[in-house]
Amino acid sequence: MLSMNLHIDQQVEGSTYYVSVAGEVDAYTAPKLKEAILPLAQESGKTVVVNLEQVNYMDSTGLGVFISALKSTKENDSQLTLVSLQDRVKRLFDITGLNSVIDIDSTVQGGNK
Amino acid sequence: MESFDFIEMKVPAKSEYVGVVRLSTSGIANRMGFSYEEIEDLKVAISEAISNATTHAYDDKEEGDVTVGFGVYPDRLEVMVADRGGSFDLNEIKDEIGPYESNQSVDDLREGGFGLFLIEALMDKVEIKNDYGVIVLMTKYRHENEVDIHDDQISTTQ
């Protein structure tokens, strides 16, 4: 059985933050994700790359975190990119139209395998 | 009267139990023969309904429960999610339902605005009643089953 919890790792390389997320993003775990990502998105002139390869479940609470992070990066002249989304997770961004505002690259392979 | 099995769960209206109901949903849908894709749709839709119930209903109170009922029919799963907390303005919520349109400003995006929209997108039928507390009634049909039967018929002729 896959874990219902969420694990978040982050690394910094120059002006880029690499955040790797693993587990399920729902109403319970989304606040933890927000706490991890929002401070990075509030810095100016940074790139925040979030690797979602190990995220096997996400719902609108997760979408809310990335909407919030996107707004922060735009306010602070930074960038947000989501990489390596599983098909099911990518589908939520497609259905909601968020794929047109959030930079999503499903072809990039995660670095923390 | 159509016969069906009924499973009921009552969980505290706290976000940590959303995942517990999601696992149960997965188990029931799997037993019914739903496809992997359909099970994932059900997990999201039901989690959204319970997240709504936990955040909208009991803002001011410590205690409260969310009741989830699963109606298991031969051709479909009906899921009812009910809270008995204070009601919210359904029309206001409905106005907020919808995908992001490219003419919208990013600033207008609401962090919590996609829950009911996803429920409607992922389920076949959705009814929301707001008389006493909020009840979300969602139905998903086993479309894959029809294909399976068809496939069997083809394979027997080979």
Image (cartoon, rainbow, N blue to C red):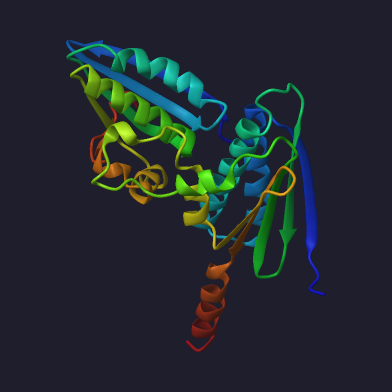
Residue B80 place in picture, x, y as percent: 70, 52
Relative height, residue A113 to residue A94 (above, below): above
List x then y, in percent, for residue A27: 55, 30
Q: Is residue A100 above or below residue B112?
A: below
Residue at screen point 68% across, 23% down: B60
Q: Residue at x 40, y 46 (%)?
A: A92
Q: Residue at x 56, y 42 (%)?
A: B48
Image quadrant where residue B57 sits: top right
In the rendered view, tell whether residue B141 sits above or below residue A69.
below
Question: Which residue in the rendered view is the most extreme toward the bottom?
Answer: B157
The image shows a total of numbered marks equal to: 0
Residue A84 sits in quarter: top left
Look at the image and tell me in which quarter the N terminus of chain B lies. bottom right
Q: Taking B99 as reference, is B68 left or right? A: right
Question: Is A89 placed left or right of B80 in the picture?
Answer: left
Q: Would residue B87 appear left or right of B141 to someone viewing this image?
A: right
Residue A103 place in picture, x, y as percent: 23, 35
Q: Nearer the viewer, residue A48 or B80?
A: B80
Q: Looking at this view, is B156 or A31 the one in front?
A: A31
Query: Picture coordinates of residue B4 (x, y %)?
Result: 78, 65
Give the left or right position of residue A75, taking residue B41 as reference.
left
In the image, residue B15 above or below residue B69: above
- Picture residue at 28% right of the left edge, 34% below the top: B106
